[in-house]
Amino acid sequence: MKKIFRIISITVILILIIIFVGNSIIRVSDGSGEDIGIIEEIFFGKSIYSFLQPPWSEDYMRWDKATEKSRIIADMIAKHGKDLINLESIRLEAVEISNSAYLDAETIDLEYLRKSNDELPEMFSSKLTYALKLWSEGLKEKDNNKIIKGNQFYNEFLQWMQSKDRDDFNRMR
């Protein structure tokens, strides 16, 4: 009986070592540009660290959607320039994305943002949220002046973000 228990113990330890080493050595992309271990991908579809973390808050998900959609709109504007208002199907898609981003940005609790950085609520609401509003209105009304003004506010927000170090922000969940 002791011998069987010892064989089982050694086998379990060897399997755990193989899993740990294999997960550390064999890395795969998780789709966002980061890499994770093959075992994590197989069992969890993401890193074990993110799997074990509590779920994201509603405010964080709105923040993430608003910032990602604002990047998409900025890319569309940069790609098409003033012609965007004449490209009906692309303009309508941009209107839909900017409206959605603006609604997400508008509903974020500014105190939630303050927990990350004291200046973030003011910069977010006066720069990014306002840029999304101007883009949304400008794209709907085919008003290039509003779109250009939205670009200015968006760029000011980005410049402010880039002027900060990662240590200037607390993690948001």
Image (cartoon, rainbow, N blue to C red):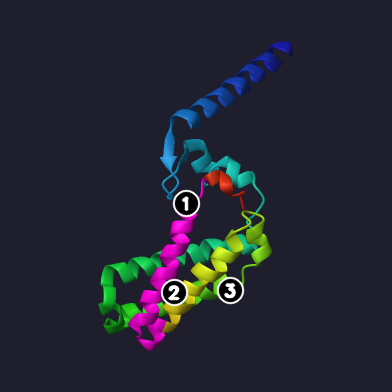
Q: Is residue 74 left or right of residue 100?
A: left
Mark 3 surroundings: few (<14), some (14-19) or many (≥20) residues within 10 A: some
Residue 91 in the image: x percent, y percent?
34, 80
Q: For mark 3, what is the residue?
A: 106
> Label 2 is placed on what type of residue?
Ile
Q: Is residue 173 visible?
A: no
> Label 1 is placed on what type of residue?
Ser
Q: Is residue 159 visible?
A: yes
Residue 115: image quadrant is: bottom right
Residue 155 drawn above or below residue 16: below
Local secondary structure at mark 2: helix
Instruction: Say which residue appears at 61% left-offset and 72% top-offset.
Output: 107
- Which part of the image, by quadrant, shows the C terminus? bottom right
Local secondary structure at mark 3: helix
Instruction: Say which residue appears at 42% left-offset and 74% top-offset.
Output: 150
Residue 10 in the image: x percent, y percent?
62, 17
Residue 114 in the image: x percent, y percent?
65, 59
Q: Is residue 75 left or right of residue 44?
A: left
> Which is closer to the viewer, label 2 or label 1?
1
- Spatial CA distance of label 2 from label 3 is 14 Å
Q: For mark 2, what is the residue?
A: 97
| Range of magenta residues | 138-165
Mark 1 surroundings: few (<14), some (14-19) or many (≥20) residues within 10 A: few
Instruction: Say which residue appears at 41% left-offset and 46% top-offset.
Output: 33
Q: For mark 1, what is the residue?
A: 163
Using the image as rendered, state which of residue 69 and residue 170 is in the foreground. Answer: 170
- Which part of the image, by quadrant, shows the N terminus? top right
Q: Main secondary structure of the magenta part?
A: helix
Residue 5 in the image: x percent, y percent?
70, 17
> Label 3 is placed on what type of residue?
Glu
Residue 97 drawn above or below residue 163: below
Q: Are marks 3 and 1 in contact (CB under 8 Å)?
A: no
